Amino acid sequence: MTKEGDMSTVGILLIFLGAAFAILLQGLRRVPAQPPTVAVMTYLGERTGQVKPEGWRFFFFCPWLYGFIPVEVAAKNQDFNPENVRTPDMAELEISAASTWRPDLEHLLDYLNSGGEVGVRKILDDMVEEAVRERAANPDKEPKTWEAAVKSKELFAAEVAAVIMGRSIDSTPQGELENIAIELRRGNGRLSIEKLGIILSRLNITNIKVKGELARDAENVAREEKQRQAETVELNHVLDRFHDLAGKDAVFPVEKALELIQTERKKITKTVQEFKLDTETARTIAAVLAAFARGR
């Protein structure tokens, strides 16, 4: 082979290697690892459904022949707007919910068709709003009262999740709903919502708050109960002190007990000028004073 032929072969080889290197560089793309991202491949601008993981990936003649759509697949927290509803007993409630979900790698085309993260968040807002209203107002299903609604938040969340998934609550066994409630509460649920292309791992009813006149009534009842408990503790202390002084078998006069209760509740005013005593009360006080003297 002549010297000119050798140089021609080397030149062709260098051109070939340069072109290959240029094609490689032109099609090399990095799929981000932070945040976690995958690439949905396209061919001539159409999605193929094939998915490539994070890292450096090659797309031949990108983006004219092969390309990709990056999809962030990290878990996403979503708090829903509080919904004002009425239970069958006509109580007005404000129900708040929150969720955690992530794109389903097996249904990424459905996820993209739903508008990606922005579209899915909007759709979920509407679905949860409708599901909460439907469950709260159904006269044939629990909860039928606001008290029952407050006590059954987990099961309420499971039924809302069933509605979101398009499943019939009436045909879903109660035990299955309870299992769904447990998984959702723990945050490790794997409920696939294929039409949105997501996996729902958590759905909690975070708060059920009574509103309106009922809220004021409930607050008054709670305040009265708290006051009653405090008074009970205080009166028990008084009774214990009485028995310490007068003996375990001593009987506290009924009329004095009622007077003490009314005094504690500020229904009557007791002053130091009141010295009028009946015979039985006088004997009791004398016994207490004598016992106290002996103790000293």
Image: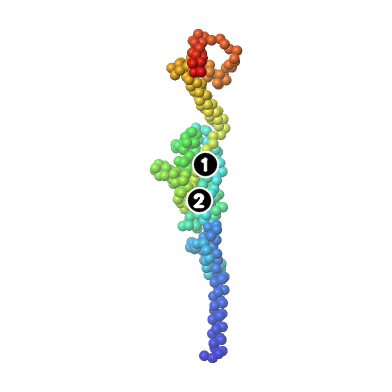
Q: Position of residue 34 (x, y in %)?
A: 55, 58
Q: Are marks 1 and 2 in contact (CB under 8 Å)?
A: no
The residue shown at (42%, 42%) is: 178
Element at badge 1? Answer: strand
Q: Which numbered disc, 1 or 2, marks the residue that appears first in the sequence?
A: 2
User: Identity of the amino acid at label 2?
Assistant: Trp
* Residue 153 appearing in the image: yes
Q: How is the image coloured?
A: rainbow
Residue at numbered disc 1 = 206
Residue closer to the observer: 103 or 55: 55
Element at badge 2? Answer: strand
User: Identity of the amino acid at label 1?
Assistant: Thr
Residue closer to the observer: 269 or 95: 269
Q: Position of residue 211 (x, y in %)?
A: 56, 34
277 displayed left or right of 248: right
Residue 86: image tag? none
Relative vertical location of residue 151 with respect to residue 15 in this rendering, above or below: above
* Residue 288 appearing in the image: no
- Alpha-carbon distance for marks 1 and 2? 16 Å
Residue at numbered disc 2 = 101
Tell which residue pokes out farthest to the bottom in this image: 2
The residue shown at (50%, 54%) is: 103
